Image (cartoon, rainbow, N blue to C red):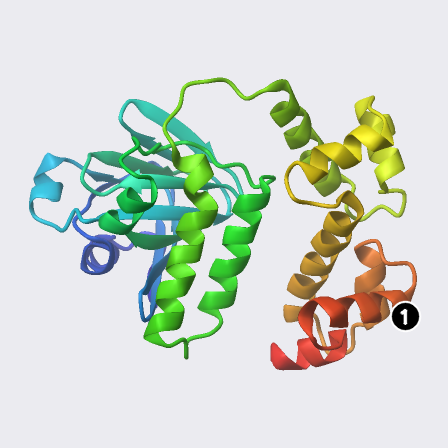
Amino acid sequence: MAAVDGGEKYQDWLAKINQVCGQFAARPLDGDFHGEIDTSYAGSLKLSTVTSRNVNLYRTRQEISRGNDAWFYTVFQLSGQASIEQDDRQVKLETGDMTLIDASRPCSILWQQTSRQVSLLLPRQLLENQLRGSAISVATRLDKSLPMVQLSQRLLHESMSSPSLSASESEAAVDAIVCLLRPMLHQQDVQPSRREKQFSRIMALIDDAIQEEHLRPEWLAGETGMSVRSLYRLFADKGLVVAQYIKNRRLDLCARALQCAHDDEKLAGIGYRWGFSDHSHFSTAFKQRFGMSPGEYRKRGR
């Protein structure tokens, strides 16, 4: 990992960016600069994790002419915020959001606070073949609440934690991510439907109340002014079951907490923090989802 902190110049960081991600230019912003980049390759998975603050990274036609433009950058925002511009569009990414950037066109990425994001290089030919010639939507915020975004993030994290992936396995992972994102990458100017807005609001409510014991389908229906039956139908249209989604979301957050939990921290306390009041139920549900007990999962993360 390359890192530059404080008042140090950022040329080394920019050189590393250019080596890994393609040709970029940069300008420092007012304030304390920080930059890190960590790269990993697993077959067809070409990933870079960038942590930055108070810097503007950009590509003009000059940088593009000196580099390889046969890629799209799929940007997963891990923490903090980032502002991204391309084709007269500007998007602000929050933690958990995603977007797509075309390497063949000018773009700008602005980090004013500490921001951490993963960029996955997707071959242009693969993406264009999947979308069958349709215009591809760039610099568009793919909200963290969307199920396909969450599935893509999960697949990416699982692939990143499996460096021994074979070439065919990594190719399959890239294909799967493109397939998951395909419905959201068609360029379109239509406004989200009322049902889509309602679904997004419900997903945000779930995240806001994920630690609360009262988070149940009946509570969600009451908060959004709809019947429980309509709530179930809304989730069914997305291929989801609302109660199962809530449970899996809680389990995923428990798994994340277990990765950094101290050895003396009680497992029951972690489960309780994310809405599991019964430790036995928590352990059973966790093992069903991850194939091992919470204790075994914590040990594996050490």
The x and y percentages for residue 247 are 77, 54
Number of other residues with Cα within 10 Å of mark 1, as a class: few under 14, some 14 to 19, many 20 or more: few
Report whether 256 appears left or right of 109: right
Q: Dot 1 lies on which element?
A: helix
Q: Name which quarter of the figure residue 38 lies in.
A: bottom left
> Which residue is at a point 70% across and 39% down the rendered structure image?
236
Q: Residue at x 41, y 79 (%)?
A: 164
Q: Position of residue 253 (x, y in %)?
A: 69, 57
Residue 96, quarter of picture: top right
Q: Residue at x 63, y 39 (%)?
A: 238
Of residues 7 and 180, the one nearer the viewer is 180
> Which quadrant holds residue 206?
top right
Residue linked to disc 1: 280
Report the front residue among 31 and 212. Answer: 212
Where residue 201 sits in the image (x, y, percent)? 68, 29
234 vs 221, left or right, is: left
| Amino acid at dot 1 | Ser
For the C terminus, the quadrant is bottom right
Left or right placement of residue 97 versus residue 189 in this view: right
Q: Is residue 39 visible?
A: yes
Q: Position of residue 277 (x, y in %)?
A: 91, 59
